[in-house]
Amino acid sequence: MTRRGSRRGQLSDLHVFRYVPADSPVHRSWAGTKICAIVVLTLGLLLWPTWAAGGLALVVVLVGALVSRIPRGVAPRVPLWIWLFLLVGAVIALLAGGGELVVLGPLRLRVGGLDEWARFSLIALDLLLFAALMSWTTQLADLAPALGRLGRPLRRLGVPVDEIVGAIALAIRCLPLLLEETRMLLAARRTRLPETPRSWKDRSLAAEQLFMAGLQSSLRRARELAEAIEARGGKMSSLGETHELGLADLFTVALVLATTAGMALLR
């Protein structure tokens, strides 16, 4: 494999659910603090979905990525079909019209629909970056204890916190495994069928076969996981949380509260 091909293969990997170790305040922050920060910022974007709110959230997540020293190569390469999907959405939004009238020579366009599309695309990008930064700076093993500690007051109301946290922890841990299974299935298919499907019918058939193979593999993994849990007693409980809050957590809380207040003031 050439050097260019090797680099292209590295860039095509999906690193969203991989922990990137580093010694930074974001990494040292408690997982529960980051979960609460994402929830508060998401609520702010839902309550005040404006350009200012989306811009403030984008600045916060970019600052977090810089402080945590996330390497540039960690970001996944966006497939071409996503760009095409966004382009089609932009064209449909532009044709929808509405809003302010813009004159470009002989063209008279109303860009209200395009403005709405771009604004909500920015908010969706913010949410994806929140999840990516969380996964890059937090180990999966820290999420379940943090969720259990955050849900501790709900136990007094009879909410099955341990069962819910256990199910969420299993789902989070299975995501990297599912991605790895998908990579293996794609590699196996390329080995057996090296030629790329040309027609849309062949492409749809290949996607259907890949989906069915992935579904069978997921069911098999789920059965093995259920048998392993049953062999160990069948009861899931969240582990005790011993993380102490520090200056990084206090700074994160202050930054999130200030950002949310800015969203409310600039709405």
Image (cartoon, rainbow, N blue to C red):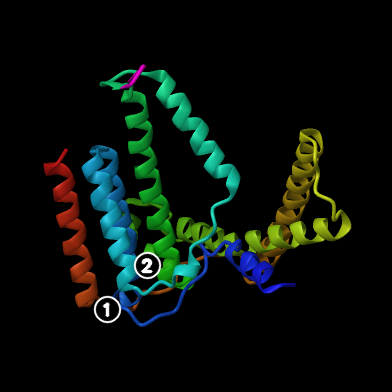
Q: Residue at x 33, y 78 (%)?
A: 242
Given residues 7 and 42, the one toward you in this image is 7
In the picture of the structure, the residue carrying the numbered disc 1 is: 244
**Does the magenta run of residues contain 106?**
yes
Q: Amino acid at mark 1?
A: Glu
Q: Is residue 250 left or right of residue 136?
A: left
* Tag 1 secondary structure: loop
- Please state the horizontal and vertical placement of residue 221, each as a whole percent of the image: 71, 60
Q: Is residue 101 left or right of residue 118?
A: left
In the rendered structure, which disc, 2 or 1, sits on the residue that comes first in sequence? 2
Mark linked to residue 146: 2
- Can residue 152 be seen at all in this image of the molecule? no
Quarter where residue 95 is shown: top left
Q: Quadrant of the N terminus?
A: bottom right
Given residues 183 and 176, the one toward you in this image is 183
| Above or below: residue 236 compared with residue 108 | below
- Please state the horizontal and vertical placement of residue 56, each as a whole percent of the image: 23, 51
Q: Is residue 178 left or right of residue 121?
A: right
Q: Residue at x 70, y 61 (%)?
A: 183
Given residues 95 and 217, the one toward you in this image is 95
Q: Residues within 10 Å of mark 1 (few under 14, many from 20)?
A: few
* Residue stretch rendered in magenta on the structure: 104-109
- Please state the horizontal and vertical placement of residue 20, each as a whole percent of the image: 46, 74
Mark linked to residue 257: none
